[in-house]
Image (spheres, helix red, strand yellow):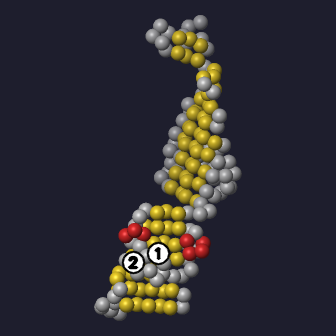
Amino acid sequence: ATFGSAPFSVTNAGVLKATSGTIGGWTLTDTTLTGGVVTLNSAGSIEVGGLADATTTATTNSGFFADSSGNVLIKGNVSGNDYLKISAGGSIDIKSQVFDLDATTLIMDSAGDGGTGVIRLGASGGPSSPTNNTAGIYMDGGGALNVYGDANNYFRIVGGSFSIKSDTFDL
């Protein structure tokens, strides 16, 4: 047999060819390298966990899957929920039962305000409540709104109360 036709061969230069085998807990086939729940596929995919592809979210399987088309899926074990999906077409889809983003000056928290959700803007996250006197914006899913500049310039809606204070007011 020649180097090209033999299922296993080594050249004098140290080039190794094998079409199957095991190395340190990894299984080698002609197209995959698999170890436990990790599979590298020569067709262009990486899988960690139990996902079948990088696009299907309606499954209770969880893990990470990336394909050569540019699709990436990171998913928990709730069907149709708890995932980050990047599609080859350029879209990013995030779905979560609870979502909390803290980017210092922007905070989005779906569990805030007793589960109705909160968005806050401003230095250090802006106002922490609808009545807080910190510059920025606070709004929640319960209908509260606080747009606060300083003690003389603000706009608030809290429960049945509506307050506007301004150095100059034009209507």
Q: Nearer the viewer, residue 38 or 44?
A: 38
Q: Secondary structure at mark 2?
A: loop
Quarter of the view holding residue 98:
bottom right
Would residue 159 be found to the left or right of residue 152 on screen?
A: right
The answer to whether the residue labelled 2 contacts the one labelled 1, judged by CB atoms less than 8 Å apart, is: yes
Category of crowding for the residue at label 2, using alpha-carbon neighbours closer than 10 angstroms: few (below 14), some (14–19), many (at least 20): many
Q: Amino acid at mark 1?
A: Ser
Where, quadrant-wise, is the N terminus in this rendering?
top right
**Residue 155 pos. (x, y %):** 41, 86
Disc 2/disc 1 C-alpha distance (Å): 8 Å
Q: Residue at x 43, y 76 (%)?
A: 127
Category of crowding for the residue at label 1, using alpha-carbon neighbours closer than 10 angstroms: few (below 14), some (14–19), many (at least 20): many
Q: Amino acid at mark 2?
A: Thr
Residue at image mark 1: 128
Would residue 53 be found to the left or right of residue 91 on screen?
A: right
Quarter of the view holding residue 152:
bottom left
